[in-house]
Image (tube, helix red, strand yellow):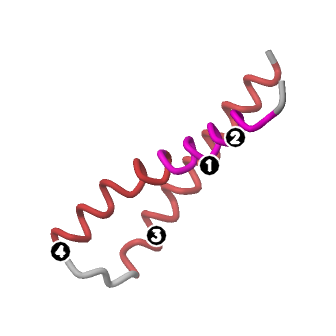
Amino acid sequence: MDNKITFLLKVLLLSLGLSVVIKFVGPLLSIPESSILAAIAVCLPSVILAVLFSWRMRQHSQQPE
């Protein structure tokens, strides 16, 4: 039970930290408005997860049983 609470707290703290960084550092960045950049921002997390999952699956399948 303690392990689940620790994991949940870590996720919540990471989320809080990321939201604070986005709120205060985001406006300081001068990123031009573009539909290409919007598409990259929307698709990039899915692409990163797909690469990580395929890498993990490849590692799992190579392990001897």
Q: Of helix, strand and loop, which one carries label 1? A: helix
Q: Nearer the viewer, residue 17 or 50?
A: 50
Measure how far apart labels 4 and 1 are at the Cα level: 29 Å
Discs 3/1, front: 1
Across and down, in percent, residue 64 comes to: 83, 31
Task: Please tell me in which quadrant of the rendered image residue 56 appears.
Answer: top right
> In the picture, which quadrant includes the N terminus?
top right
Gap between marks 4 and 3, in whole Å?
22 Å
For the residues bearing labels 1 and 2, Cβ distance under 8 angstroms: yes
Tell whether 46 sits left or right of 16.
left
- The residues tagged by marks 2 and 3 sit, at their Cα atoms, a distance apart of 21 Å
Q: Amino acid at mark 3?
A: Phe
Residue 14 is marked as 1
Q: Which residue is mark 2?
A: 10
Which span of residues is magenta-colored?
50-63
Asked if residue 55 is positioned above or below residue 30 in the image, the reply reads above
Residue 60 picture location, percent across and down = 71, 35
